Amino acid sequence: MMDATEVRDDLLHPLKTHFGHERFRPMQAPIVADALAGRDSFVILPTGGGKSLCYQLPAVVGDGVTIVVSPLIALMHNQVDLLSANGVPAAYLNSTLSRDAQRDCEQRALAGEFKLLYLAPERIMSSWGRSLLARLPVSRFAIDEAHCISEWGHDFRPEYRMLGELRTGFEGRFADVPIMALTATATPRVADDVVRQLNLREPTIHRGDFERKNLHYVVRPKQQVFEHICRYLRDRPDAEGIIYCQSRAKVDDLAARLQQQGFAALPYHAGMASEDRAANQQAFLHDEAKVMVATIAFGMGVDKPDVRFVMHADLPRHLEGYYQETGRAGRDGLPAECILYYSGTDRAKIEYFIEQKTDPAEKAHAYEQLEQIIRFANTTECRCVPLLTHFGQAHEGNCGHCDNCLDPPKMTDATEDAQKLLSAIARTDQRFGLTYVIDVLRGSKAERVMTNGHHALSVHGLGSHKPKAYWQLIAQTLIKDNQLAITPDEFRVAHLTEASLSVLRGQAEVEVPMNRASASSGRSES
Ligand code: ADP
Ligand code: ZN
């Protein structure tokens, strides 16, 4: 067997003639080799990493036809056009084709004209799709956006579920046809799920490098945000960037206020008329508008290389989204800045939304995601650690491109406060969530506190001198060091651990950063 790191010379020629590339990008060569050896594989590469080539090249040099499953029609058209322009016979079959065009395409596929055939997942599994597949010399399957098969992902699509049958159904016809699953967004849990759902057979997992070294990550307290944004834009009159907000109303408001200050800012959200949305997007792409103020509806498929900053005026709901959104900065490889404005109030808002969910599993999952992004926002260590851990990638040492590495936060002793928090958890019998315990600590007279008799506890009111966010920060710090734990279900009950005792006994010190987003007593925090 060939060494995966060595590039086969016979592949460089088709790489050049059919795709115009001189060399492989990192990971591409071993992935292509795997495919040609007939193995299953799971490819996890960041957006722009060059995933398509991983199945297109094997399709070109191998026999038969490669079936590509893709959920995005626009993307299918785009790829087929590119391939055709490069002399690679490819086609798509989807609902946009007329009946005649479909029949024609089918005939040509059966005549063996195509190297690649793109199909939407629901098409493949229809009786029409099944009968077509049965008559084609299928050499491999490529499942693009494979995370869509997992409910743990952020983009679950029920029509993807049936793809598991490729391996097990079809009267065993495809039992030995290799499958390549591809995605830019698999967390370790989603990755396991994809492998299981697709019935992949001992797949090689090819996980790329998700670290974006030209992006400078900064988290700032969410105070005087408008003033800060204005100053930022004035200092960089040529910079173009995106400001993400959680709500449509806030997008409209912020864009209008920035316009009043003379900035070329435009709004973008799903509530706008589609012509207006398209016009604003074009203005941004053609550098007429410098700043796009948008909800997360903006960005899919937008490929503007010179975005110099991405700001999050509100806390995103999960790290996945944060990574994808900030990933739109610095596509040209030049330095770009990612600024997150964070306050504990945002956390409470998201918790409120999560509480509206009725499905316990969904609720627990949403809480888990929230905790991950909070960990990112609160960390005093390298921001790349929580960010890359999310993608199953380890990161050690100083990254040299985040605020914590470039300007390490000054720490202050908080052992006594940590003891207060842990005592409050103990005194309320380890039966409540953090929000409640913190309320008790801060002397809340809420009905629930009174009914439980917790206003009579000695810890009641002990922490009233500090904002909620400060106590949340203490809690996060303790959780990180296993000195406090939260049940991983929808109830999120805070409870003590073995290590809590050493804090309570004064055997372990607890430190928190000074003057940080959540440690400072923001006005909105009480
Ligand atoms: P992904 O699907 O991972 O987001 P694409 O497959 O769309 O990425 O590729 C992103 C870009 O990289 C495309 O413009 C593609 O032509 C280019 N590309 C892919 N492989 C190579 C290579 N080996 N050398 C140079 N450019 C490449
Ligand atoms: Zn760092």
Image (cartoon, rainbow, N blue to C red):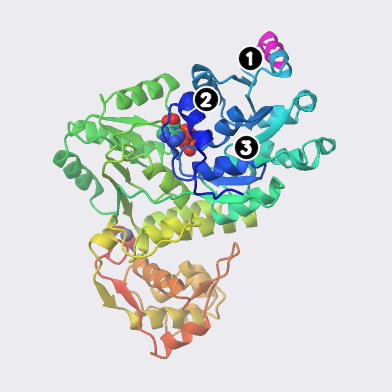
How much space separates mark 1 and mark 2, taking CA atoms? 16 Å
* Residue nearest the viewer, comparing 33 with 308: 33
Which label belongs to residue 97?
Answer: 1
Where is mark 2, residue-wise?
Answer: 79
CB atoms of marks 1 and 2 within 8 Å:
no
Instruction: Name the residue rendered at 47%, 24% in the picture.
Output: 17
Residue 300 visible within the image: no
Q: Amino acid at mark 2?
A: Gln
Instruction: Name the residue rendered at 58%, 66% in the picture.
Output: 488
Q: Secondary structure at mark 3?
A: strand
Where is mark 3, residue-wise?
Answer: 143
Which label belongs to residue 148?
Answer: none
Above/below status of 431 relative to 31: below
Earlier in the chain: of badge 1 and badge 2, it is: 2
Q: Residues within 10 Å of mark 2 (few under 14, many from 20)?
A: some
x, y percent for residue 288: 25, 24
How much space separates mark 2 and mark 3, taking CA atoms? 14 Å
Q: Amino acid at mark 1?
A: Leu
Q: Secondary structure at mark 2?
A: helix
* Residue nearest the viewer, comparing 175 with 368: 175
Earlier in the chain: of badge 3 and badge 1, it is: 1
In magenta, the rendered stretch is 97-106
Q: Amino acid at mark 3?
A: Ile
Which of labels 1 and 2 is toward the front? 2
Is-magenta flag for residue 443? Answer: no
